[in-house]
Amino acid sequence: MREEMLEREALELIDAHLDDDLLTDQQVEQLTAWLNEHPQHAKQVFHRLHLHAFLRRRLHAQRLLVTSDRTDLSTVPSNDVVRPTDLFLQPPGNAVVHTGKSWSRKVLLACGILLACVMFMVIAAGLWLSNNQSPAIPFEAPYAYEGFDYPATSIPAPAIDAATWPTTGGMQGLSGGDGWAEPWQEDGSKVSVIVDHARELNWDPKDMRKFKPLEHVDVQGNVLQTSGLQMRTAMGVRSLTTRGLDLAAFPPSMIDESGLGSDGTILWLSFLAQSFNSTAENNRYTYFQVGTRDVSGFRLGKIGAAPSGNWTAAGLLTGAQVNVRSSAVPSGEMSFLVARLEFRPGPEEATVWINPGLSSEPKLADATLRLSVPDFRFDAVRINANFSTDIDEIRIGPSFRAVAPIGK
């Protein structure tokens, strides 16, 4: 039997049942199976029950007024049929006793209809909750992601002295994450390393990173999704850690002959960061860079040109930092840095938020920093440091949601 015919027949049986027509054993079994088949069936039964209950109450009241002398319904044969009147309303003063097979059928059908009503109420409650709670926040994958999910680097304890910092190994050759064309490369006189905050010992009293691993929790309690350990740039003479991007992971519309950043496109990037402390003396810096120093690009992090030691953004043009914008947030404070790069004909527009809320895309008017950046393209990321800073959760994507996912 086709599904639409089965549904029509089932609804006709429901109506017949509620109108005191007699149902056979086979009809009872078919109707019970149909009730349990799909939640939508429960909804349809619920509406019919509601209407018939109203009409039956009125009819029952009229019958009570007309006569008080009722026929004994227990004399009606009930071996082969079910009288639905007995299931819903019993006439006052004459109890009906059911036995054997008929009573089993009645209990089965009554339980089926009761289950249908319960199912409908559960569905209705679920719909009410979904309509009265905050909308679900959709997930959007980034084009490139690095969570530094690698084993911790073996470094001399306590590793707080520049003289003991590793000069080889470190991040060299690590190739996890997504959206990358090659492993990490180390090109400085020192190397960046992978650290496990839970295993840290002998913290320097001034090290602001000792309290907990990198994370971001917004004012509403939303937690940034994180995984793995975290990267730490070199202490002392610089580390230079770079990795090329897989351009095939990006839409063709974002790429021109010079790399990522074709005019009319927008890219978002983000990362967690915290420095040893916020001191800016002795040209201490650690920054995340896209583009090149010799031609043009964009830097975000702890920049030597900012005497405050706070998180700063700057453009690059032929070897110089331009349009430097410094925030009021110290680099020794754990921070979530998000940048929106809008590529235009001529200079690009860079917008930076520090520790934004995660529930929705932040407004441009609420940005921490805004600056014009010389026209640039890029195909790799570079983390350049002359001061020990921890970095984690690097993301590059098409939207704020792609670079700021909420953890479960």
Image: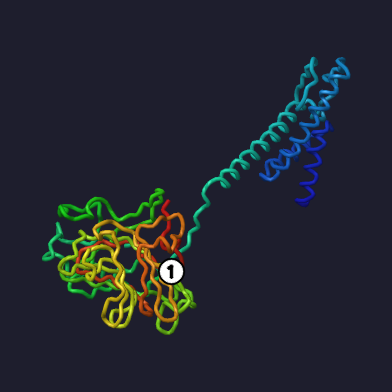
Quarter of the image holding residue 165? Answer: bottom left
Taking the spot 39% from the left edge, 56% from the top edge, the residue there is 225
Examine the rendering and report whether any part of residue 149 can be seen: no
Quarter of the image holding residue 71? Answer: top right
**233 sits left or right of 45 in the view:** left
* Residue 23 image position (x, y, % from top left): 81, 34
Examine the rendering and report whether any part of residue 6 can be seen: yes
Q: What residue is disc 1 on?
A: 143
**307 sits left or right of 29 in the view:** left
> The residue tagged with tag 1: helix, strand or loop?
loop
* Residue 142 image position (x, y, % from top left): 43, 66
Q: Is residue 319 above or below residue 308?
A: below
Q: Is residue 297 above or below residue 402?
A: below
Quarter of the image holding residue 208? Answer: bottom left
Q: Amino acid at mark 1?
A: Tyr
Q: Residues within 10 Å of mark 1 (few under 14, many from 20)?
A: many
* Residue 244 image position (x, y, % from top left): 34, 75
Give the residue furthest to the front: 365
Give the residue furthest to the bottom: 257
**378 sits left or right of 56 in the view:** left
Q: How is the image coloured?
A: rainbow
Taking the spot 77% from the left edge, 36% from the top edge, the residue there is 51
